[in-house]
Image: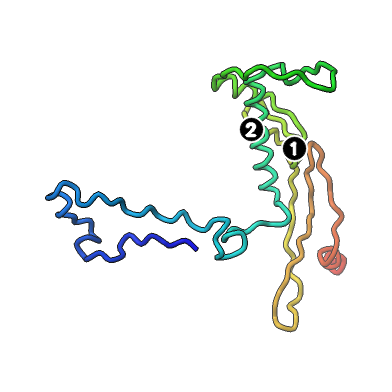
Amino acid sequence: GHEQFQPDEGKGKDEEDGDDKNDEEDGGGDDEKAPSPDPGPGPSDESGPAGGFTFSETPGPFALIQYDVVVALAFAACDASYGDLLSTSSGSETPSPLPDPKSFTGRDFYDSFLRTDFEGLFGRVRIDPRTGSRDYTTVPYSVSNFVARDPDAKGTVAFDLITTDLYDGAEKKDKKKKGKMAEKEKEME
């Protein structure tokens, strides 16, 4: 494992407060460098799964959106650097090698980003040129309710996630109510 750097380890009261009179008197003290702090658990650290990092087997919507952002920025950089060379095809199975990429300005990059349009992991990725952000009609949204179940024998309460409304692209879709929510609504009628 890694050793943790302890900045106050082995120092007296005066040294802890930053009162290093000896350093001023002798021109800076000894030439040894202080050990750098430990960067924390890494992949080889045995403190937990994957070195203390946890991973979800199923990526959530934020991870998918973040992935789409990285891809959109990469596409914009390629487009700004190569322009129409990437969008035209020679029709041959073996593409000709691309020339060296050209330098581009921030304006070139932003203009390319505004033209971004591809099928991402979290729906169609299209940028609204008026706002410079993702076109809201390409992002699926849902409204869900957490409905409590009756406590089990140990008194633990679990919840059902009931999606009541779904906005997928430009269409609004009503989801059928199911489970305990539908049963409770029937009881109320």
Q: Amino acid at mark 2?
A: Ser
| Label ID, residue 73 | none
User: Around disc 2, counting alpha carbons within 10 Å, would you say few (fewer than 14), some (14 to 19), or many (20 or more)?
Assistant: few
Q: On the image, numbered disc 2 is attached to which residue?
A: 133
Left or right: 91, with 122 as reference point: right
Which mark, residue 120? 1
| Amino acid on which disc 1 is placed | Gly
Q: Is residue 85 above or below residue 152?
A: above
Q: CA distance from mark 2 to mark 1?
A: 15 Å
Kindly state the secondary structure of the residue where label 1 is placed.
strand
Provide residue 131's location: percent of width, then percent of height.
62, 29
Name the residue located 78 percent from the left edge and 21 percent from the top edge.
95
Q: Residue at x 57, y 60 (%)?
A: 51
Instruction: List the single residue furthest toward the bottom.
Output: 153
Q: Above or below — where is 39 with respect to 157?
A: above
Horizontal side of 133 relative to 168 (left or right) equals left
Colour style of the rendered protein structure: rainbow
The image quadrant that residue 80 belongs to is top right
